[in-house]
Amino acid sequence: MGFLDDLKRQADAAKALQNTDTGFLSRQAALTDAACQTAFTYLATLAQQLNVLCPASRVSYRLDRRQAFDGLRLRDFRADARRKKLRGQEAFDHVALRWRLVSGTPVAFVKNFLPDIEQLESRLRRSGARFTSEAVRNPATAKLQEMRYELVADFEASVLVTPDHDAGRLRFELVNLDGFETVTLDFASFEIGSGRLDELARWIVGEPNTFVQGGQQLRRIEA
């Protein structure tokens, strides 16, 4: 066998491997995109039903030891999906469900201890609430004496689903379902069906659920 024939054999083997890899990735992408479509269809239908029912949250949302809010109404559900190009084909970029936790209650309070201020402001940013703050300083020294806050206790929550088409996985980012925290975890695409999404819906409305069971890379970040 000549040198050119040997190079041809190596090139043919490399092409066969590339075709195998491309076929595998295409199958992974198709399965993952189908899971995204399932999630979007489910969440869009869920949003319609919950916008009629406006259920009361069963979770207590706590800004600090004194400021806790119960029975918040779940309203203004909005399902959304965005797409992108993947290897020249249309594919899901993400699927999202967002909603508001509404009390309509105006609140005003004061913080004068730096760790309390930092923790409160972290929770306010995570909560999605619109608030105003005012720093009160000592006229003589300009030293911070206290922070004054005003807000209406209406918060935001969301579910964001981001696919990894090549890995055949979906990442769920769940914001403020169990108080002011963010939960992230991954599922294989084939695990996303009506059963798993029913458990997510139960979690959203505050019912006992098993949504996280079997998830990978589970992480909770409290505000």
Image: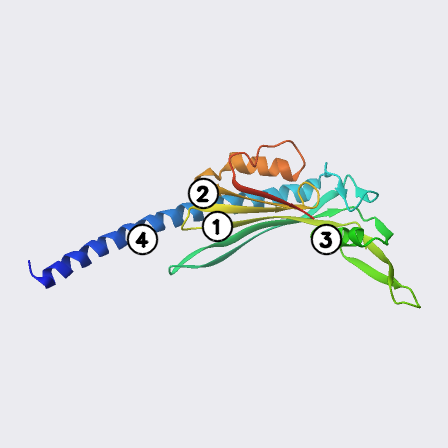
Task: Judge left or right: residue 134 versus residue 56.
Answer: right
Residue positioned 49% across, 57% down in the render: 83
Label 2, on which residue?
189
Residue positioned 79% across, 42% down in the render: 69
Residue positioned 88% across, 67% down in the render: 142
Mark found first going from the N terminus, 2 or 4: 4
Label 1, on which residue?
163
Q: Nearer the viewer, mark 1 or mark 3?
A: 3
Asked whether the residues under the numbered discs 1 and 2 touch, taking CB atoms below 8 Å apart as contact, a structural biologist would say: yes
Identity, as a three-letter code, of the amino acid under mark 3: Ser
- Residue extending furthest left? 1
| Residue 46 percent across, percent down from the top left | 60, 42
Identity, as a three-letter code, of the amino acid under mark 1: Pro
| Residue 79 percent across, percent down from the top left | 59, 50
Query: Which numbered dot is residue 122?
Result: 3
Q: CA distance from mark 2 to mark 4?
A: 18 Å
Identity, as a three-letter code, of the amino acid under mark 2: Ser
Q: Nearer the viewer, mark 3 or mark 2?
A: 3
Q: CA distance from mark 4 to mark 1?
A: 18 Å
Q: Nearer the viewer, mark 3 or mark 4?
A: 3
Residue positioned 71% across, 53% down in the render: 128
Report crowding for label 1: few under 14, some 14 to 19, many 20 or more residues within 10 A (C-alpha): many
Label 4 residue SS: helix
Q: Is residue 134 above or below residue 54?
A: below
Identity, as a three-letter code, of the amino acid under mark 4: Thr
